[in-house]
Amino acid sequence: MHTFKQIRTLKPLALFLWLLPLWLFTACDLQVVGTSGAVSPPDKKVYLYKSDDTFVLYKDNQSFRIHGASGDPRYIRQLAEAGGNCLRVYDTLRLAQVLDTAYRYGIAIIADLPLPKSQHLSFYRDQQQVKAQFHAYRDFVRRHKDHPALLMWMLGNELDFPYKPNYTPFYRAYNDLLAMIHQVDGQHPVATALTNFQRRTITNIRLKIPDLDLLGINTFGLLKDLEQDMADFAWMWDGPYFVSEWNINGYWEVPMTAWGAPIEDAGWKKGEELVERFYQEMPYHDPRFLGSCLFYWGHKQERTETWFNTFTYDGIPTALYEAYEQLNDCSLSYPTAPELKYMLLDSAGSSDHIMLHPGQLYTAHLVFDHPPDSTLQTRWRLLDEDWYSLELDTVVPVFQYDHLLDTAGTKMVRFRAPAHEGPYRLYATLHYPGSIATAVNTPFYVIE
């Protein structure tokens, strides 16, 4: 048995001979219909159709291009109003209710079936836990497989797919679940979501999970490379895929302060970046590309409370929501956001690596392209920095220090720096009544 490192060093002829049985074995495994000519609909609610090198997703015998989002099902109605047709949900909570609501608004649902990551080998070596998971998901799939709003199943999110033999229990459990879904519900395809394009991961899926129907790719700053990457690696994976998460650059892909806090753009700039990325970086020319889901639909604390969100914490649509409407050629549902440019904290900006003294008073100002009118509403918040540990896979709770806001107005705030040394962030969220909200924040460090 070759290791993956050995595979990469094989001579071309040896590599071809080593992979030939794989290609012969898996060439017919992909769950697709047809090879050329007109569609002859099978007895399936959702299926993939292949014509030459082109893949098309069909739902109810109509071609279905994914123009969707990933996130909170409480905002299904707003997704339909913004021109979306599909929502990916990340858990199984109240799925029956989610599917009913989605069907009412003409939204299809990609339903995640969460799994422990492959690194949790203690779980996958425990046959009782694996069996309990299998039976739970079998019953779950049976309950929901016939709902007309269901589009596909997402079996795991960013699991990682290693090559080493000690991961055999993980692959056995995964393939058993995949086979079960195909048997219990032959009406819907099954995907999994990967972190960016990774040759190693896709190779191992092709080698060890040949019956997977399609791939979801979660990618942000690397979206620009996806089409070329997938084309260059089509000799290994020539099946269909979609972008299961995308947005502006992630907080791990932007400039940082001296203490490692990411510098976030103001809301209006993020909206511009989103539109530009959609039109310039999506892999539209790839005939295997099935569409995309914007992340995050709703509100989610992820490094900051504003980074990817299409809604504020109290449900007001943001500049990213407005940009999404533009992508779907919708007439705008809300008046545009205030023309906010950036925030200055005592004449310094985020890239100036601001350090403050504990307990002292400071002033922050908002800078606009045009002066706002008197109806502008501004909410100021002072929070801990959100420190995230990839090793522990946990998020440290974020504490509020709004009691330190001394004098707050629509364009400025005077506040007292927290007493304890450490990283903090000052937020301003602005909107006119009934309008899109925009936000800006500035990280700073309190040092004694």
Image: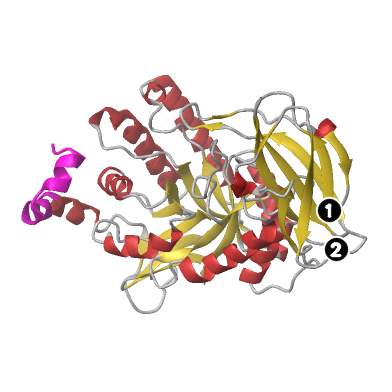
Residue 55, label in figure:
none
Query: Which image quarter holds the N terminus?
Result: top left
| Count of numbered circles in the view | 2
Residue 411, label in figure:
1
Residue 315 in view: no
Query: Which image quarter holds the C terminus?
Result: top right
Does 5 sit left or right of 335 as displayed? left
Name above or below for residue 170 compared with residue 432: above
The disc labelled 1 sits on which kind of residue?
Lys
Q: Residue at x 25, y 33 (%)?
A: 164
Q: Which residue is mark 2?
A: 372
Determine which quarter of the picture holds residue 86.
Answer: bottom right
Q: Secondary structure at mark 1?
A: loop
Q: Earlier in the sequence, mark 2 or mark 1?
A: 2
Q: Residue at x 50, y 36 (%)?
A: 137
- Which of 258 and 240 lies nearest the eye of the viewer? 258
